[in-house]
Image (spheres, rainbow, N blue to C red):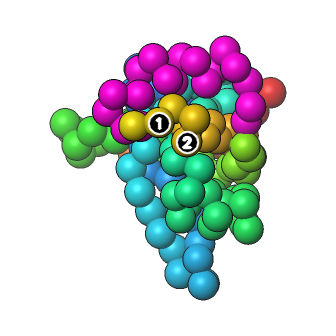
Amino acid sequence: MHLLDVQETALSILSNERVGTLASVHDGKPYTRYMTFYNEGFTLYTVTSKNAPKVHELLANPRTHILYGYENNDLLEEFLEIEATVSEYDDATIKEQFVQHFKDAYFNDPSDMLVLKVTPTRLRIMNKTGDQQQEVPLP
């Protein structure tokens, strides 16, 4: 697969799927939870409560691992394995997008909502029929 094809496939998965697992570490133990993401290019954004345990875990160790886009419709379906760093993100435009989409489902008080920015350091396309994993060159 050519460089542009690999990047286009990864961006397609990021744009067409919204759910992935996000891992953190607390007291030397891994914790994983499902999260809903929004992407701009290869950068992901997600929201959580400011007081959620994962926020404290990710501020103490901002490295994360994400499995993204696997729906179990087909055992050979493509999905992404993402290694990334997480930081708090305070952009009013993105926060407003999340407030509109998630306020009723997740937040009684939108002021409790925290946007996390997930910046990939390594990205791979996994489980591709007949091929091995594909490393995605990041810009």
Amino acid type, callout 1: Asp
Q: Which residues are magenta?
A: 89-107
- The percent position of residue 15, horizontal first and vertical second, equals 48, 20
Residue under the point 49% across and 23% down: 99
Main SS of residues in magenta: helix
Q: Which of the 4 image quadrants contains residue 27?
A: bottom right
Residue for badge 2:
112
Query: Is residue 88 within the magenta segment?
Result: no
Quarter holding the C terminus is top right
Residue 6 appears in the rendering? no
Give the secondary structure at mark 2.
Answer: helix
Q: Where's residue 111, x and y in %?
A: 57, 35
Indicate the amino acid at tag 2.
Answer: Asp
For mark 1, what is the residue? 109
The foreground one among 71 and 38 is 38
Q: Nearer the viewer, residue 3 or 117?
A: 117
Q: Is residue 63 above or below residue 100?
A: below
Disc 2, disc 1: CB below 8 Å? yes
Residue 123, how many percent across, how many down? 63, 42
